């Protein structure tokens, strides 16, 4: 089962940064932190992942605390199209990705 | 951009009938997965497949389910005798290697009547 804790829902004003937290206090040294999102009933979409360093790509930034027990996904300028369920997942094995309930982000005009 | 393709997008079937859901993973990917999502619920892992065999499966994936990679490009999920509770979105995914991102298809909505 999922080894992460996320708030069930969040709101963000359009154009502002959306900061989505995730707790993974039992993460082990070789586990990566992955973020995916699911817009309505579409297939989940990969956003970003990291091991211990902060990461940035064209979609988002991932900030991982030094002790690796929590992380934050940052969408720098949220748009209405970013309204989705965001999943924080920790994994080592490529045998499966286990989804929790995630955070339902609503971007408000 | 490469993508995972699933067909059909929507399938309606009578209870007790067999259905085959089809997926074309990204061509150089080596690991393949099926997930399902019952309406309003979370995405659930069904099965993973590597090197032409199942590498892991969940308790949902019982004897009514099977997977196959018949021709090196398609990856199929068969449900032998569908039940009403099999109604869900079914997602296929693939990854090229460990510790890389999974690419998901857009899903097949299965409705059992």
Image: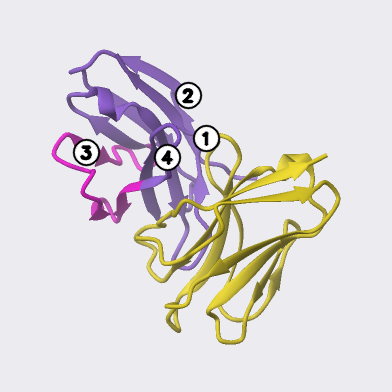
Quadrant housing residue B41: top left
Q: CA distance from mark 1 to mark 2?
A: 8 Å
Q: Earlier in the sequence, mark 1 or mark 2?
A: 2
Please tell me which residue lies in front, A105 or A34. A105
Whether discs 4 and 2 lie on one chain: the answer is: yes
Closer to the chain start, of discs 1 and 3, is 3
Instruction: Say if labels 1 and 2 share a chain.
Output: yes
Judged by depth in the image, the label closer to the viewer, 4 or 2, is 4
Q: Position of residue A11 (x, y in %)?
A: 71, 49
Asked if residue A11 lies in the magenta stretch, the reply is no
Give the letter of the chain under mark 1.
B
Mark 2 is surrounded, within 10 Å at the Cα level, by few (under 14), some (14 to 19) or many (20 or more) other residues, namely some
Above or below residue B37? Residue B108 is above
Contact between marks 1 and 2 (CB within 8 A): the answer is yes
Residue at the spot of label 2: B9
- Mark 1 or mark 4, whichever is nearer to me: 4
Which residue lies under the disc numbered 3?
Answer: B66
- Between A87 and B76, the residue placed more toward the observer is A87
What residue is pinned by disc 1?
Answer: B106
Chain where mark 3 sits? B
């Amino acid at each position: 089962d999922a080894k992460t804790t996320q708030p069930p829902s969040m709101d963000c004003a359009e154009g502002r940064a959306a900061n989505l937290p995730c707790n993974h206090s039992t993460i082990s040294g070789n586990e990566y932190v992955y973020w995916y999102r699911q817009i309505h009933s579409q297939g989940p979409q990969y956003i970003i992942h990291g091991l211990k360093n902060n990461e940035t790509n064209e979609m988002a930034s991932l900030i991982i605390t030094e002790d690796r027990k929590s992380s934050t996904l940052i969408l720098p300028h949220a748009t209405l199209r970013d309204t989705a369920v965001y999943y924080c997942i920790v994994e080592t094995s490529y045998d499966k990705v286990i989804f929790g309930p995630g955070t339902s982000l609503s971007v408000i005009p | 951009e490469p993508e995972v393709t699933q067909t059909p997008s929507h399938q309606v079937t009578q209870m007790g009938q067999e259905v085959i859901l089809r997926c074309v993973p990204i061509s150089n990917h080596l690991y393949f997965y099926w997930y399902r999502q019952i309406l309003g619920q979370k995405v659930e892992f069904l099965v993973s497949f590597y090197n032409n065999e199942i590498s892991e499966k969940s308790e949902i994936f019982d004897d009514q389910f099977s997977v196959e990679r018949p021709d090196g490009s398609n990856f199929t999920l068969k449900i032998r005798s569908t039940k009403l509770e099999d109604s869900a979105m079914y997602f296929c995914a693939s990854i090229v290697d460990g510790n890389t991102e999974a690419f998901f298809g857009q899903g097949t909505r299965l409705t059992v009547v």
